[in-house]
Image (cartoon, grey):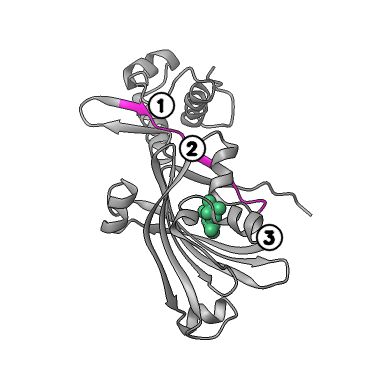
Amino acid sequence: MIDRESPVPIYYQIEEYIKQLIETEALNPGDAIPSEREFTEQFKVSRMTVRQAITNLVNEGYLFRQKGKGTYVSKQKIEQTLQGLTGFTEDMKKRGMKPDSKILDFKLIPADLKVAKQLYINEHDPIYEIKRIRLADDLPMALEMSYLPANLIKGLTEEIVNSSLYEYIEDNLQLKIDYATQEIESSLSHEDEAKLLDIPKNVPILLIQRQTFLDNGQPFELVKSKYRGDRYKFVIDMKRR
Ligand code: GLP
């Protein structure tokens, strides 16, 4: 399995081997992986090399260590493609997962100047401010703060935002969601966010900001989402020229 002639470093080959065990479900979330000593004997490599491979997989979120016990397979991350404009509910349904929301805040407030500008409305025009925890199969995945102009996205209720905003906008209001601009950056979980997302504080999370438009060019939402870094990765296919 290990190709010593290959220019690919041996620790990397071991990483790929372990990843394959996870992908083929020979190892499942929660399973202990073989010990460093076992790998050392299996591959006839130094313990350092094995440790390097395992540490890399821990850092990438494939494995986690438990002090004094061993190293285990993590729940694998949700792969979210960056192509196409989709909503949380449809994304989770497509994966066969159960989407859910917990509403932390739902109010009608006057827009401040900054938000008003981004939504192409006047300062003090009414907007909905919605804060939700988004869950998949009952596990918190993201915290989401949305602003929507109330004169455009009419009749929102807590019940609606408890399920899908995008479904309501398209199916009930018959508006056409068209495109969005989105920024992704890294951040650290603050104490209150950590509690809500059920993660430790000060661990990496993904901060995603989206401004979404209808087909007439009118923005209808500003969203600031904080996704769990241990449960999400974003994927995009790229082609040269
Ligand atoms: C994702 C996006 C949000 C969007 C939401 C709509 O979570 N990051 O910008 O508002 O989907 O999802 P739903 O239709 O489930 O309310």
Instruction: Decide if ligand 1 comes within 8 Å of the CB at mark 2.
Output: no
Q: Quadrant of the C terminus?
A: bottom right
Which of the 4 image quarters holds residue 187? bottom left
- The residue nearer to you, when weighing 23 against 104, is 104
Question: Which of the numbered marks, if any, corresponds to residue 29?
Answer: 1
Residue 144: where, in percent of width, then height? Answer: 44, 58
- Rounded to the nearest angstrom, the CA distance separating label 1 from label 3 is 42 Å
Query: Residue at 56% of width from left, 39% of height from top?
Result: 93
Percent coordinates x, y for residue 171 in the rendering = 65, 54
Q: Nearer the viewer, mark 1 or mark 3?
A: 3
Q: Which residue is drawn at 28% across and 48% down?
A: 200
Q: What amino acid is labelled 3 in the image?
A: Gln
Q: Is residue 83 above or below residue 56?
A: below
Residue tagged 2: 98
| Label 3 Cα neighbours within 10 Å, binned few <14 / some 14-19 / many ≥20 | few
Q: Which of 231 and 158 is in front in this view?
A: 158
Q: Is mark 2 on a helix, strand or loop?
A: loop
Give the vertical position of 240 relative to 38 (above or below).
below
Which element carries disc 1, helix, strand or loop? loop
- Residues 6 and 97: in front is 97
Tell me, for residue 174, which label it has, or none. 3
Magenta span includes 83: yes
Sooner in the amino-acid sequence: mark 2 or mark 3: 2
Read off the magenta span.
71-84
